[in-house]
Image (cartoon, helix red, strand yellow):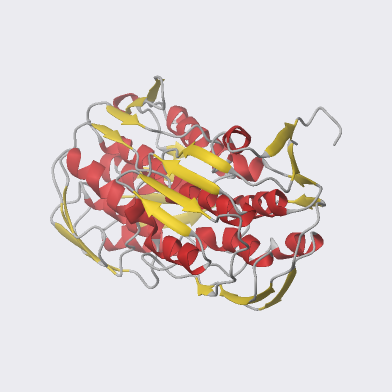
């Protein structure tokens, strides 16, 4: 199992190119199932989760051709079986995305109940409820979701009990080929939902309202392939900008979109950072200053994203003052706290709330990553710490950050990967 070894204390400076968004690329890949002709996706990040999704599609018989610079061409017409097995699904929750596409185009699907980061139960009941609202018969048998429909799915009204990004995306994909009109209420408003809607519309879907809490979809007979580019990864963008804040440095993130990060950029300003933006870049300059502590509550978009909570907690750990962090999205997303405290942070957790008292410095220590975003919080803490930190179980970070040690090295970080064949 690979590890990252980081020597902290270096102020990071320079430019970093942002990759395509993992959380967009995964549903976009699943949506290619709907197309009657090949789909060309550009700006697809080279990540473990992406490779897993492509293995699932290949297992079902779809033809996948990889080009250069993140281009992937997918043909669903060679699909031979609508089964996503446990062996492939167990490491990634996003595998459930294939369910809606398979049922609406091929009338039946067997998809294993998924695995993924241990940050809460994240049940798939809202996904299943949406398919049932469109006329599918859904059962759970021996760890598999079996969904089936005679003929076409029928348009209907879907009212989600809670805001769910994945559930909204699955419902959108299913509704594109359903007969009649589908109305999705209490829909997620995340940029990744909009990205999926934009590609589906380019394929011929009739969708209105993506980016609001009410999405209306008029079903069509068929969708065709198209060429589409995955949107920039807003969480990767925020994470590298956080590296500037935590080290007192200056970093410009390129090939990104400032409009995706309003809530995060406002918090960086509150921390004392100078924030500059252009059409496709964001720059953070801390001018060597210690950041000010900021309090926040995670909420669905457009509020502060849960996927940036751990990174901001790492900054708050070395900031001036005391902050309160309230996590409202996932019930088990403070697992990075004990590891940060091992490095000298002063963080107390009470239920869904963490109180962070900023300390003058952190110390390098051996720590262990528990989930994807927790991994990056430990990297940020290690960059700011005195001495050496070794982060274990970094397969989590490889699920969501493309070439992380290479990008950080280009910014001046002293970081290297320790192969599992070498003793730490």
Task: Pick the quarter of the image with the N terminus.
Answer: top right
x, y percent for residue 159: 29, 70
Total count of labels: 0
Q: Is residue 168 above or below residue 144?
A: below
Q: Is residue 340 above or below residue 386?
A: below
Answer whether residue 112 is visible to the viewer in this image: no
The quadrant in which the C terminus is found is: top right
- Camera-side residue of 353 and 286: 286
Which residue occupies 69% across, 63% down? 335
Residue 223 image position (x, y, % from top left): 19, 37
Q: Could you tell whether 123 is left or right of 153 in the image?
A: right
Q: Residue at position x 37%, y 37% from top?
A: 29
Instruction: Name the residue at the right extreme.
Output: 423
| Residue 249 left/right relative to 368 | left
Q: Nearer the viewer, residue 230 or 280?
A: 280
Q: What residue occupies the far bottom of the structure in this picture?
A: 350
Q: Is residue 404 left or right of residue 348?
A: left
- The structure residue drawn at horizontal position 15% and vertical position 52%, both measured from the top left corner, is 179
Residue 58, position as x, y percentages in the image: 44, 27
414 left or right, relative to 82: right
Q: Is residue 248 above or below residue 107?
A: below
Residue 108 sits in which quadrant? top left
- Residue 130: x percent and y percent? 33, 61
* Residue 42 appears in the rendering: yes
Residue toward you, 272 or 173: 272
């Amino acid at each position: 199992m690979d590890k990252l070894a980081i020597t902290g204390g270096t102020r990071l400076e320079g430019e970093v190119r942002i990759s395509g968004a993992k959380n967009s690329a995964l549903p976009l890949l699943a949506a290619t199932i709907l197309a009657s002709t090949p789909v060309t996706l550009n700006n697809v990040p080279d990540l473990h989760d992406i490779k897993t999704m492509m293995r699932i599609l290949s297992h079902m018989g779809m033809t996948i051709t990889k080009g250069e610079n993140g281009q992937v061409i997918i043909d669903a017409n060679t699909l031979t079986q609508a089964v996503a097995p446990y062996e492939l699904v167990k490491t990634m929750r996003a595998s459930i995305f294939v369910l809606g596409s398979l049922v609406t185009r091929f009338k039946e699907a067997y998809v294993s109940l998924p695995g993924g980061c241990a940050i809460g139960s994240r049940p798939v009941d809202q996904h299943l409820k949406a398919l049932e609202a469109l006329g599918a018969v859904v059962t759970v048998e021996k760890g598999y979701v079996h969904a089936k429909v005679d003929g076409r799915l029928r348009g209907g009204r879907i009212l989600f009990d809670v805001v769910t990004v994945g559930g909204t995306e699955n419902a959108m994909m299913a509704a594109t080929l359903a007969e009649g009109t589908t109305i999705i209420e209490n829909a997620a408003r995340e940029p990744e939902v909009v990205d999926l809607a934009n590609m589906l519309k380019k394929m011929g879907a009739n969708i209105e309202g993506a980016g609001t809490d009410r999405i209306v979809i008029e079903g069509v007979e068929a969708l065709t392939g198209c060429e589409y580019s995955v949107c920039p990864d807003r969480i990767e963008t925020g994470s590298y900008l956080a590296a500037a804040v935590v080290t007192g440095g200056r970093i410009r993130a390129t090939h990104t979109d400032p409009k995706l990060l309003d809530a995060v950029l406002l918090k960086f300003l509150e921390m004392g950072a100078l924030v500059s933006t252009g059409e496709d870049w964001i720059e953070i300059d801390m001018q060597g200053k210690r950041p000010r502590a900021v309090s926040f509550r995670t909420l669905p978009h457009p509020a502060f994203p849960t996927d940036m909570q751990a990174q901001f907690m790492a900054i708050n750990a070395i900031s001036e003052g005391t902050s309160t962090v309230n996590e409202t999205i996932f019930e088990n997303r403070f697992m990075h706290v004990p590891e940060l405290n091992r490095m000298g942070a002063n963080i107390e957790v009470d239920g869904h709330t963490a109180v962070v008292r900023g300390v003058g410095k952190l110390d390098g220590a051996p720590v262990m990553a528990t989930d994807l975003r927790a991994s990056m919080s430990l990297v940020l803490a290690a960059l700011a710490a005195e001495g050496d930190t070794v982060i274990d179980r970094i397969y989590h970070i490889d699920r969501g950050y493309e070439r992380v040690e290479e990008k950080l090295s280009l910014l001046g970080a002293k970081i290297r990967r320790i192969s599992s064949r070498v003793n730490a």
